[in-house]
Image: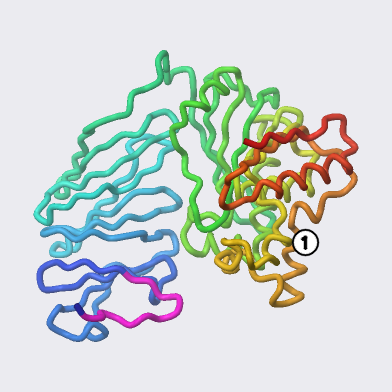
Amino acid sequence: PHVFEARREGIRYSLGDRGDFWYILTNDGAVNGRLLKVPMSGESNQNRVEVLPGDEHISYGGMEAFKDHLVLSARKEGITGFYLLDPDKETTRWITSPGVGGSLQLEKTPNFDSTTQRFSYETLLQPYTVAEVEMTGGEIRTLKQKALPEGFDPNRYRIESTTATATDGTKLPIWLLLPADHLRDGSGGLLLDGYGAYGISSDPWFDSDVFSLVDRGVGFAIAQVRGGGEFGRLWYEAGKQERKGNTFTDYIACAEHLIAEGYTSSAQLCGTGASAGGLLAGAVINERPDLFAAFIANVPFVDVLNTMLDATLPLTTSEYDEWGDPASSPEIFERIRHYSPYDNVRKQSYPALLVLAGWNDNRVSYWEPAKWVAKIRTQNTGSTPPLLSTA
Protein backbone atom coordinates (compact mmCIF):
# COMPACT_ATOMS: atom_id res chain seq x y z
CA PRO A 1 0.00 0.00 0.00
CA HIS A 2 1.10 3.55 -0.64
CA VAL A 3 -0.32 7.03 -0.22
CA PHE A 4 -2.20 8.19 -3.29
CA GLU A 5 -2.38 11.79 -2.15
CA ALA A 6 -1.30 13.35 1.13
CA ARG A 7 -3.91 14.88 3.40
CA ARG A 8 -4.82 18.49 2.79
CA GLU A 9 -7.05 20.58 5.01
CA GLY A 10 -10.61 20.68 3.66
CA ILE A 11 -9.95 18.36 0.68
CA ARG A 12 -11.89 15.12 0.32
CA TYR A 13 -11.44 12.48 -2.36
CA SER A 14 -12.40 8.91 -3.15
CA LEU A 15 -10.92 6.52 -5.71
CA GLY A 16 -12.16 3.97 -8.20
CA ASP A 17 -9.95 1.82 -10.38
CA ARG A 18 -11.05 0.82 -13.86
CA GLY A 19 -8.80 -0.40 -16.65
CA ASP A 20 -5.62 1.62 -16.83
CA PHE A 21 -6.97 4.62 -14.92
CA TRP A 22 -7.74 5.79 -11.45
CA TYR A 23 -10.95 7.80 -11.23
CA ILE A 24 -10.98 10.48 -8.55
CA LEU A 25 -14.08 12.08 -7.09
CA THR A 26 -12.95 15.17 -5.19
CA ASN A 27 -14.01 18.58 -3.95
CA ASP A 28 -10.63 20.01 -4.97
CA GLY A 29 -11.53 22.85 -7.31
CA ALA A 30 -15.30 22.26 -7.03
CA VAL A 31 -17.11 22.60 -3.72
CA ASN A 32 -19.81 20.07 -4.70
CA GLY A 33 -17.34 17.68 -6.32
CA ARG A 34 -15.92 16.85 -9.75
CA LEU A 35 -14.59 13.70 -11.42
CA LEU A 36 -11.01 13.34 -12.65
CA LYS A 37 -8.98 10.48 -14.06
CA VAL A 38 -5.25 9.77 -14.07
CA PRO A 39 -3.22 6.90 -15.58
CA MET A 40 -2.24 4.25 -13.04
CA SER A 41 1.27 4.23 -14.45
CA GLY A 42 1.94 7.91 -13.72
CA GLU A 43 2.21 10.14 -10.69
CA SER A 44 -1.14 10.69 -8.97
CA ASN A 45 -0.83 14.47 -9.07
CA GLN A 46 0.13 14.72 -12.73
CA ASN A 47 -1.65 14.15 -16.06
CA ARG A 48 -5.07 14.48 -14.49
CA VAL A 49 -7.97 14.84 -16.91
CA GLU A 50 -11.34 16.25 -15.90
CA VAL A 51 -14.15 13.83 -16.80
CA LEU A 52 -17.10 15.63 -15.16
CA PRO A 53 -16.69 19.29 -14.15
CA GLY A 54 -18.06 20.79 -10.98
CA ASP A 55 -21.65 22.05 -11.13
CA GLU A 56 -23.35 24.23 -8.51
CA HIS A 57 -26.63 22.39 -9.23
CA ILE A 58 -25.13 18.89 -8.73
CA SER A 59 -23.60 17.61 -5.50
CA TYR A 60 -21.67 14.34 -5.81
CA GLY A 61 -21.66 11.94 -2.88
CA GLY A 62 -19.71 8.79 -3.75
CA MET A 63 -18.46 6.57 -6.54
CA GLU A 64 -18.33 2.89 -7.50
CA ALA A 65 -16.22 1.61 -10.41
CA PHE A 66 -17.24 -1.34 -12.64
CA LYS A 67 -15.80 -2.97 -15.72
CA ASP A 68 -17.84 -0.90 -18.16
CA HIS A 69 -19.31 1.91 -16.05
CA LEU A 70 -18.84 4.28 -13.17
CA VAL A 71 -21.69 4.96 -10.75
CA LEU A 72 -21.77 8.31 -8.95
CA SER A 73 -24.31 9.04 -6.24
CA ALA A 74 -25.48 12.64 -6.40
CA ARG A 75 -28.09 15.24 -5.63
CA LYS A 76 -29.35 17.12 -8.68
CA GLU A 77 -31.34 20.27 -7.96
CA GLY A 78 -31.96 18.83 -4.49
CA ILE A 79 -33.21 15.45 -5.77
CA THR A 80 -31.36 12.27 -4.77
CA GLY A 81 -30.16 9.86 -7.47
CA PHE A 82 -27.07 8.65 -9.26
CA TYR A 83 -25.30 8.92 -12.58
CA LEU A 84 -24.37 5.94 -14.74
CA LEU A 85 -21.24 7.00 -16.60
CA ASP A 86 -19.78 5.15 -19.58
CA PRO A 87 -16.27 6.66 -19.70
CA ASP A 88 -15.48 5.08 -23.07
CA LYS A 89 -18.49 6.68 -24.76
CA GLU A 90 -18.41 9.74 -22.51
CA THR A 91 -22.15 9.44 -21.84
CA THR A 92 -24.14 9.74 -18.61
CA ARG A 93 -27.59 8.59 -17.55
CA TRP A 94 -29.42 10.08 -14.54
CA ILE A 95 -31.40 7.67 -12.34
CA THR A 96 -33.70 8.88 -9.58
CA SER A 97 -36.70 7.64 -7.60
CA PRO A 98 -39.41 6.35 -9.98
CA GLY A 99 -42.06 8.03 -7.82
CA VAL A 100 -42.56 11.72 -7.08
CA GLY A 101 -41.68 12.96 -3.60
CA GLY A 102 -39.07 10.32 -2.92
CA SER A 103 -35.49 9.68 -1.87
CA LEU A 104 -32.95 7.18 -3.18
CA GLN A 105 -29.69 5.60 -2.09
CA LEU A 106 -27.22 3.18 -3.67
CA GLU A 107 -26.90 -0.38 -2.40
CA LYS A 108 -23.77 -2.51 -2.55
CA THR A 109 -23.09 -4.20 -5.87
CA PRO A 110 -19.83 -6.06 -5.14
CA ASN A 111 -19.23 -7.77 -8.51
CA PHE A 112 -16.81 -5.72 -10.65
CA ASP A 113 -18.22 -7.30 -13.84
CA SER A 114 -21.83 -6.48 -12.93
CA THR A 115 -24.02 -4.97 -15.63
CA THR A 116 -26.62 -3.82 -13.09
CA GLN A 117 -26.58 -1.45 -10.14
CA ARG A 118 -28.78 -2.09 -7.13
CA PHE A 119 -30.44 0.77 -5.27
CA SER A 120 -33.27 1.44 -2.83
CA TYR A 121 -35.85 4.18 -2.71
CA GLU A 122 -39.05 5.25 -1.01
CA THR A 123 -41.56 8.04 -1.46
CA LEU A 124 -44.17 9.67 0.70
CA LEU A 125 -46.63 7.08 -0.69
CA GLN A 126 -44.38 4.09 -1.44
CA PRO A 127 -42.50 2.13 1.22
CA TYR A 128 -38.85 1.02 1.11
CA THR A 129 -38.22 -0.65 -2.23
CA VAL A 130 -35.13 -2.40 -3.60
CA ALA A 131 -34.57 -2.23 -7.36
CA GLU A 132 -31.78 -2.56 -9.93
CA VAL A 133 -31.01 -0.77 -13.15
CA GLU A 134 -29.35 -2.06 -16.29
CA MET A 135 -26.25 0.09 -16.67
CA THR A 136 -26.33 0.09 -20.46
CA GLY A 137 -30.02 0.42 -21.29
CA GLY A 138 -31.31 2.06 -18.10
CA GLU A 139 -34.17 -0.41 -17.56
CA ILE A 140 -35.29 -0.56 -13.92
CA ARG A 141 -36.57 -3.74 -12.24
CA THR A 142 -38.20 -3.83 -8.82
CA LEU A 143 -36.79 -6.67 -6.71
CA LYS A 144 -38.49 -6.31 -3.34
CA GLN A 145 -40.80 -3.92 -1.52
CA LYS A 146 -41.63 -3.59 2.15
CA ALA A 147 -45.21 -4.60 2.92
CA LEU A 148 -47.76 -1.82 2.97
CA PRO A 149 -49.81 -1.22 6.14
CA GLU A 150 -53.09 -3.11 6.20
CA GLY A 151 -55.89 -1.15 4.54
CA PHE A 152 -53.53 1.37 2.96
CA ASP A 153 -55.10 3.14 -0.03
CA PRO A 154 -52.84 5.65 -1.85
CA ASN A 155 -55.89 7.25 -3.49
CA ARG A 156 -56.79 8.78 -0.14
CA TYR A 157 -53.74 11.04 -0.26
CA ARG A 158 -51.89 13.41 -2.55
CA ILE A 159 -48.31 14.63 -2.76
CA GLU A 160 -47.51 18.25 -3.50
CA SER A 161 -44.42 20.42 -3.53
CA THR A 162 -44.20 24.16 -3.16
CA THR A 163 -41.43 26.73 -2.73
CA ALA A 164 -41.07 29.40 -0.08
CA THR A 165 -38.78 32.42 -0.40
CA ALA A 166 -36.25 33.23 2.32
CA THR A 167 -35.57 36.77 3.51
CA ASP A 168 -32.55 36.96 1.18
CA GLY A 169 -34.44 35.57 -1.83
CA THR A 170 -33.26 31.95 -1.55
CA LYS A 171 -35.86 29.41 -2.73
CA LEU A 172 -36.82 26.85 -0.08
CA PRO A 173 -38.50 23.58 -1.18
CA ILE A 174 -41.36 22.13 0.85
CA TRP A 175 -42.78 18.63 0.34
CA LEU A 176 -46.33 17.87 1.46
CA LEU A 177 -48.36 14.73 2.07
CA LEU A 178 -52.01 15.77 2.23
CA PRO A 179 -55.46 14.20 2.44
CA ALA A 180 -56.87 13.92 -1.08
CA ASP A 181 -59.58 16.42 -0.19
CA HIS A 182 -57.31 18.91 1.62
CA LEU A 183 -58.60 22.40 0.82
CA ARG A 184 -56.46 25.46 0.12
CA ASP A 185 -58.65 27.79 2.15
CA GLY A 186 -56.60 27.81 5.35
CA SER A 187 -58.94 25.46 7.18
CA GLY A 188 -56.68 22.40 7.13
CA GLY A 189 -54.31 21.36 9.88
CA LEU A 190 -50.62 20.83 9.07
CA LEU A 191 -47.58 19.37 10.82
CA LEU A 192 -44.38 21.06 9.57
CA ASP A 193 -41.11 19.18 10.13
CA GLY A 194 -37.71 20.91 10.13
CA TYR A 195 -34.06 20.08 10.88
CA GLY A 196 -31.32 22.01 9.06
CA ALA A 197 -28.00 20.93 10.60
CA TYR A 198 -24.82 18.92 10.01
CA GLY A 199 -25.41 18.80 6.26
CA ILE A 200 -28.08 16.11 6.83
CA SER A 201 -30.82 16.22 4.22
CA SER A 202 -34.53 16.14 5.07
CA ASP A 203 -35.77 14.11 2.13
CA PRO A 204 -39.31 12.76 1.67
CA TRP A 205 -39.72 9.29 3.13
CA PHE A 206 -42.45 6.74 3.79
CA ASP A 207 -43.59 6.87 7.41
CA SER A 208 -46.57 4.68 8.22
CA ASP A 209 -47.11 6.57 11.49
CA VAL A 210 -47.86 9.78 9.58
CA PHE A 211 -50.90 8.30 7.84
CA SER A 212 -52.90 8.04 11.05
CA LEU A 213 -52.50 11.82 11.29
CA VAL A 214 -53.32 12.46 7.63
CA ASP A 215 -56.36 10.18 7.86
CA ARG A 216 -57.72 12.61 10.47
CA GLY A 217 -57.34 15.55 8.11
CA VAL A 218 -53.92 16.86 9.17
CA GLY A 219 -51.32 17.21 6.42
CA PHE A 220 -47.60 16.58 6.83
CA ALA A 221 -44.91 18.87 5.40
CA ILE A 222 -41.10 18.80 5.24
CA ALA A 223 -39.24 22.11 5.10
CA GLN A 224 -35.84 21.83 3.40
CA VAL A 225 -34.00 24.67 5.13
CA ARG A 226 -30.36 25.73 4.98
CA GLY A 227 -27.96 23.91 7.26
CA GLY A 228 -29.05 20.60 5.73
CA GLY A 229 -27.41 18.98 2.71
CA GLU A 230 -30.25 19.11 0.17
CA PHE A 231 -28.34 21.30 -2.29
CA GLY A 232 -24.76 20.40 -1.47
CA ARG A 233 -21.97 21.85 0.59
CA LEU A 234 -22.82 25.51 0.09
CA TRP A 235 -26.40 24.89 1.29
CA TYR A 236 -24.98 23.33 4.44
CA GLU A 237 -22.46 26.10 5.05
CA ALA A 238 -25.20 28.72 4.62
CA GLY A 239 -26.83 27.38 7.81
CA LYS A 240 -23.96 26.84 10.25
CA GLN A 241 -21.62 28.89 12.44
CA GLU A 242 -22.09 32.63 11.77
CA ARG A 243 -24.91 31.84 9.28
CA LYS A 244 -26.93 29.64 11.65
CA GLY A 245 -29.70 32.22 11.79
CA ASN A 246 -30.62 31.32 8.21
CA THR A 247 -31.93 27.96 9.41
CA PHE A 248 -34.47 29.61 11.69
CA THR A 249 -35.57 32.39 9.33
CA ASP A 250 -35.88 29.82 6.51
CA TYR A 251 -38.27 27.72 8.60
CA ILE A 252 -40.30 30.79 9.52
CA ALA A 253 -40.47 31.70 5.81
CA CYS A 254 -41.78 28.18 5.05
CA ALA A 255 -44.48 28.50 7.72
CA GLU A 256 -45.53 31.92 6.43
CA HIS A 257 -45.64 30.61 2.86
CA LEU A 258 -47.86 27.64 3.76
CA ILE A 259 -50.25 29.98 5.55
CA ALA A 260 -50.25 32.51 2.69
CA GLU A 261 -50.95 29.75 0.15
CA GLY A 262 -53.93 28.45 2.12
CA TYR A 263 -52.47 25.07 3.08
CA THR A 264 -53.13 25.92 6.71
CA SER A 265 -53.49 28.82 9.14
CA SER A 266 -51.62 29.86 12.26
CA ALA A 267 -54.52 28.44 14.27
CA GLN A 268 -54.05 25.04 12.56
CA LEU A 269 -50.25 24.85 12.18
CA CYS A 270 -48.04 22.65 14.36
CA GLY A 271 -44.26 22.60 14.03
CA THR A 272 -41.97 19.72 14.92
CA GLY A 273 -38.24 19.12 15.16
CA ALA A 274 -35.89 16.65 16.86
CA SER A 275 -32.42 17.09 18.35
CA ALA A 276 -30.85 19.90 16.28
CA GLY A 277 -34.35 20.30 14.86
CA GLY A 278 -35.40 20.90 18.46
CA LEU A 279 -32.95 23.80 18.53
CA LEU A 280 -34.81 25.10 15.49
CA ALA A 281 -38.08 24.65 17.40
CA GLY A 282 -36.85 26.63 20.40
CA ALA A 283 -35.36 29.45 18.34
CA VAL A 284 -38.44 29.77 16.14
CA ILE A 285 -41.03 29.91 18.91
CA ASN A 286 -38.98 32.55 20.72
CA GLU A 287 -39.07 34.71 17.60
CA ARG A 288 -42.50 33.92 16.09
CA PRO A 289 -44.79 32.19 18.59
CA ASP A 290 -47.75 33.76 16.80
CA LEU A 291 -47.23 31.59 13.72
CA PHE A 292 -48.02 28.30 15.44
CA ALA A 293 -50.88 26.76 17.37
CA ALA A 294 -48.56 24.08 18.75
CA PHE A 295 -45.01 22.71 18.55
CA ILE A 296 -43.46 19.31 19.27
CA ALA A 297 -39.79 19.36 20.33
CA ASN A 298 -38.20 15.90 20.49
CA VAL A 299 -34.97 15.65 22.57
CA PRO A 300 -34.36 19.32 21.73
CA PHE A 301 -30.88 20.84 21.85
CA VAL A 302 -31.99 24.03 23.57
CA ASP A 303 -29.31 24.97 26.11
CA VAL A 304 -26.73 25.59 23.41
CA LEU A 305 -24.58 28.19 25.12
CA ASN A 306 -24.11 26.36 28.42
CA THR A 307 -23.51 23.04 26.68
CA MET A 308 -20.93 24.44 24.27
CA LEU A 309 -19.13 26.13 27.17
CA ASP A 310 -18.71 22.77 28.95
CA ALA A 311 -15.80 20.98 27.28
CA THR A 312 -16.08 18.08 29.75
CA LEU A 313 -19.25 16.85 28.05
CA PRO A 314 -18.41 14.01 25.61
CA LEU A 315 -19.64 15.64 22.40
CA THR A 316 -18.93 19.33 22.99
CA THR A 317 -15.49 19.67 21.39
CA SER A 318 -16.53 17.69 18.31
CA GLU A 319 -19.41 20.15 17.85
CA TYR A 320 -17.23 23.26 17.58
CA ASP A 321 -17.16 22.94 13.80
CA GLU A 322 -20.96 23.16 13.67
CA TRP A 323 -21.72 25.88 16.22
CA GLY A 324 -18.36 27.39 17.17
CA ASP A 325 -16.50 27.50 20.50
CA PRO A 326 -18.06 30.25 22.65
CA ALA A 327 -15.11 30.14 25.05
CA SER A 328 -12.71 31.09 22.26
CA SER A 329 -14.03 34.58 21.52
CA PRO A 330 -16.65 37.12 22.66
CA GLU A 331 -18.00 37.23 19.08
CA ILE A 332 -18.84 33.52 19.01
CA PHE A 333 -20.21 33.71 22.57
CA GLU A 334 -22.62 36.50 21.61
CA ARG A 335 -23.56 34.83 18.35
CA ILE A 336 -24.68 31.64 20.09
CA ARG A 337 -26.33 33.56 22.94
CA HIS A 338 -28.37 35.45 20.36
CA TYR A 339 -30.24 32.29 19.25
CA SER A 340 -29.80 29.77 22.09
CA PRO A 341 -33.43 28.90 22.97
CA TYR A 342 -32.99 28.70 26.75
CA ASP A 343 -31.22 32.05 26.90
CA ASN A 344 -33.90 33.82 24.86
CA VAL A 345 -37.09 32.69 26.59
CA ARG A 346 -39.01 35.84 27.46
CA LYS A 347 -42.40 36.92 28.73
CA GLN A 348 -44.81 36.29 25.87
CA SER A 349 -47.58 33.93 24.80
CA TYR A 350 -46.08 30.63 23.65
CA PRO A 351 -47.97 28.05 21.56
CA ALA A 352 -48.99 24.73 23.09
CA LEU A 353 -45.72 22.83 23.51
CA LEU A 354 -44.99 19.11 23.87
CA VAL A 355 -41.36 18.41 24.80
CA LEU A 356 -39.98 14.86 24.72
CA ALA A 357 -36.72 14.17 26.58
CA GLY A 358 -34.62 11.03 27.03
CA TRP A 359 -32.98 9.85 30.25
CA ASN A 360 -30.21 8.15 28.30
CA ASP A 361 -29.93 10.24 25.14
CA ASN A 362 -26.18 10.55 24.53
CA ARG A 363 -26.49 13.75 22.50
CA VAL A 364 -28.99 15.90 24.38
CA SER A 365 -28.93 15.44 28.14
CA TYR A 366 -32.34 15.28 29.82
CA TRP A 367 -31.73 18.41 31.89
CA GLU A 368 -31.63 20.64 28.79
CA PRO A 369 -35.32 20.27 27.86
CA ALA A 370 -36.24 20.11 31.58
CA LYS A 371 -34.75 23.50 32.45
CA TRP A 372 -36.05 24.99 29.17
CA VAL A 373 -39.61 23.91 29.96
CA ALA A 374 -39.28 25.21 33.53
CA LYS A 375 -38.21 28.62 32.26
CA ILE A 376 -41.03 28.80 29.69
CA ARG A 377 -43.53 27.98 32.45
CA THR A 378 -42.39 31.06 34.39
CA GLN A 379 -42.50 33.36 31.34
CA ASN A 380 -45.45 32.07 29.32
CA THR A 381 -48.42 34.45 29.26
CA GLY A 382 -50.47 32.05 27.14
CA SER A 383 -53.23 29.82 28.43
CA THR A 384 -51.57 26.47 27.67
CA PRO A 385 -48.59 25.40 29.80
CA PRO A 386 -45.81 23.37 28.11
CA LEU A 387 -45.83 19.61 28.67
CA LEU A 388 -42.66 17.60 29.35
CA SER A 389 -42.36 13.84 28.94
CA THR A 390 -39.07 12.16 29.91
CA ALA A 391 -38.60 8.49 29.10
Q: Residue furthest top?
A: 151
In this rendering, is residue 107 above or below 32?
above
Report x, y in % for residue 194: 60, 44
The residue that appears at 11% across and 73% down in the rendered structure is 20
In this view of the protein, can residue 171 be seen by the observer?
no
Q: Which residue is mark 1?
A: 338
Amino acid carrying label 1: it is His
Q: Residues within 10 Å of mark 1 (few under 14, many from 20)?
A: some
The residue that appears at 40% across and 81% down in the rendered structure is 8
Report x, y in % for residue 328: 69, 77
**Which residues fall within the magenta stretch?**
2-13
Report x, y in % for residue 338: 77, 61
Residue 339 shown in magenta: no
Q: What quarter of the picture does the N terminus occupy?
A: bottom left
In screen coordinates, is 368 left or right of 68? right
Q: What quarter of the picture does the C terminus occupy?
A: top right
Rendering quarter of residue 217 = top right
The residue that appears at 58% across and 64% down in the rendered structure is 319
